[in-house]
């Protein structure tokens, strides 16, 4: 049964204890349903050590330590606050802080006073977020910040939950970020995040005794909402048992490399497979069998697959012109045609292509050794000037091996079958 848990707090680190626990009767997954608060995130605060402005005259031991109230400041407002503050005006009326909008760098000028920017270990200074390094800046010199302004340090808001642990953060495993989004609302505006599609993650426990939610920035630092209420809603739902189809799809995904390999082989041997595929299509429709279709054995009687008497007479006339040794070899090959295919291959192909196609391909293999030189073979292995071809690719036949131009070799008892079922060639 699906359910949701809503929590509201003024802290960005929320902990809820459930004494009796929430029992999850099966595998569950959880996702963030909504986040609602106001953008009251301060960029000036004592915790950030950027709320002090130090100013003193050259001939004076003591100086001014101006404390800027905690809050969220736009750049122009911050510069105006410092430059026009009465205490600053009293000792340095000519203080100038100027922003170059092209370089996003701030320039500092004073007439009579020094400006100190101490490191965080010594003190705090607002000028660090304006790009100035740790130093003492002398009067009567225009000082330009070494770095651009970084007045809004929070770019991304992340919600973390102890119920999950399957994500990655900067390639680190076990991250429990359940949702994150860019902070694009203006200061004081309401932040409302409701994902159109909730991303669910597997819950890593079957009993919820403690729920911990944290709202952090891109550096995984807790975000201070200045006491503003923060509301979060999590949706839990059971994981449906995997179906047979889903299991098959998952298995297919894991074997994607196998399919990619088959695709690569298909492209590699396209010139070989294309004429064979055409042959398959023509075999399915007996009306399109060419007149010069090859022969096959039926017992000890030789005949053409084609029922055309003229073709049969043509073959017999060509066969009669052959030397007795070649006629004997042809007859022997036709009687022992089972030699060209072992039983396992035959059973596999018959289940895949059908018995008729297997017989036809067996005849193709037979012709690789026994085709009369003058016999015109239209499909499969053919001879041009006594050179055997498959399609437009010349091949070499030695003993029981068929060699392709790229060096791949096939046993003649399996060669064309390997091409048809896309098994990896043996080399």
Image (cartoon, rainbow, N blue to C red):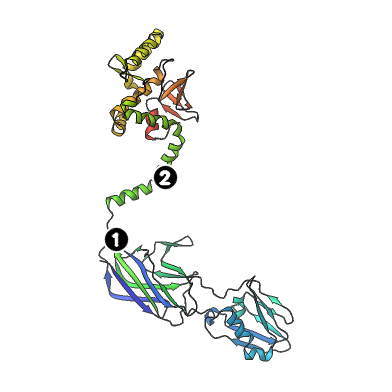
- Left or right: where 146 falls relative to 380: right
Of 215 and 288, nearer the camera is 288
Q: Where the N terminus falls, by quadrant?
A: bottom left
Determine the residue positioned at 61% across, 76% down: 130
Q: Residue 55, labelled with which disc?
A: none
- Left or right: where 154 falls relative to 58: left
State the image quarter where residue 421 is shown: top left
Q: Position of residue 132 (x, y in %)?
A: 64, 75
Query: Which residue is the site of mark 1?
Result: 239
The mark that comes first in sequence, 2 or 1, is: 1
**In what element is the residue under mark 2?**
helix
Q: Residue 257, labelled with which disc?
A: 2
Of 347 and 283, nearer the camera is 283
Up/down of 268 relative to 42, above or below: above
- Circles 2 and 1: CB distance less than 8 Å? no
Distance, label 2 to label 1, CA atoms, is: 28 Å
């Amino acid at each position: 049964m699906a359910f949701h848990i809503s929590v509201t707090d003024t802290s960005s680190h929320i902990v809820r204890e459930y004494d009796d626990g929430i029992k999850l009767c099966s595998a569950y997954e959880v996702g963030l349903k909504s986040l609602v608060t106001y953008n009251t995130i301060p960029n000036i605060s004592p915790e950030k050590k950027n709320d002090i402005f130090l100013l003193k005259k050259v001939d004076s031991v003591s100086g001014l330590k101006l404390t800027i109230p905690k809050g969220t400041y736009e750049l122009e407002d911050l510069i105006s606050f410092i430059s026009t503050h009465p205490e600053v005006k009293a000792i340095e009326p000519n203080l100038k802080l100027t922003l170059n909008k092209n370089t996003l760098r701030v320039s500092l000028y004073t007439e009579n006073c020094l400006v100190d920017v101490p490191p965080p270990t010594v003190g705090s200074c607002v000028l660090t977020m304006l790009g100035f390094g740790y130093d003492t800046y002398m009067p009567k010199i225009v000082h330009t910040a070494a770095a651009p302004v970084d007045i809004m340090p929070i770019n991304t808001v992340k919600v973390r939950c102890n119920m999950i642990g399957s994500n990655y953060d900067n390639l680190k495993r076990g991250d429990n970020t359940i949702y994150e989004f860019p902070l694009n609302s203006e200061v004081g505006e309401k932040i409302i995040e409701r994902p159109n599609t909730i991303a669910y993650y597997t819950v890593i426990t079957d009993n919820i005794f403690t729920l911990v939610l944290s709202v952090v920035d891109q550096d995984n630092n807790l975000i201070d909402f200045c006491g503003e209420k923060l509301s979060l809603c999590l949706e839990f739902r059971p994981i449906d048992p995997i179906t047979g189809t889903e299991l098959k799809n998952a298995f297919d995904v894991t074997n994607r490399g196998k399919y990619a390999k088959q695709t690569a082989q298909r492209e590699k041997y396209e010139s070989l497979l294309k004429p064979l595929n055409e042959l398959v299509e023509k075999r399915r429709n007996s009306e399109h069998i060419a007149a010069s279709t090859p022969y096959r054995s039926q017992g000890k009687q030789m005949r053409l697959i084609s029922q055309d008497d003229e073709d049969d007479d043509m073959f017999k006339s060509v066969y009669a012109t052959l030397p007795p040794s070649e006629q004997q070899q042809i007859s022997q090959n036709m009687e022992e045609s089972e030699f060209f295919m072992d039983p396992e291959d035959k059973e596999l192909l018959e289940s895949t292509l059908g018995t008729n196609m297997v017989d036809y391909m067996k005849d193709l293999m037979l012709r690789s050794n026994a085709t009369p030189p003058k016999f015109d073979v239209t499909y499969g292995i053919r001879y041009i000037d006594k050179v055997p071809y498959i399609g437009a690719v010349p091949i070499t036949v030695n003993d029981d091996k068929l060699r392709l131009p790229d060096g791949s070799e096939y046993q003649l008892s399996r060669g064309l079958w390997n091409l048809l079922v896309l098994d990896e060639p043996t080399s």
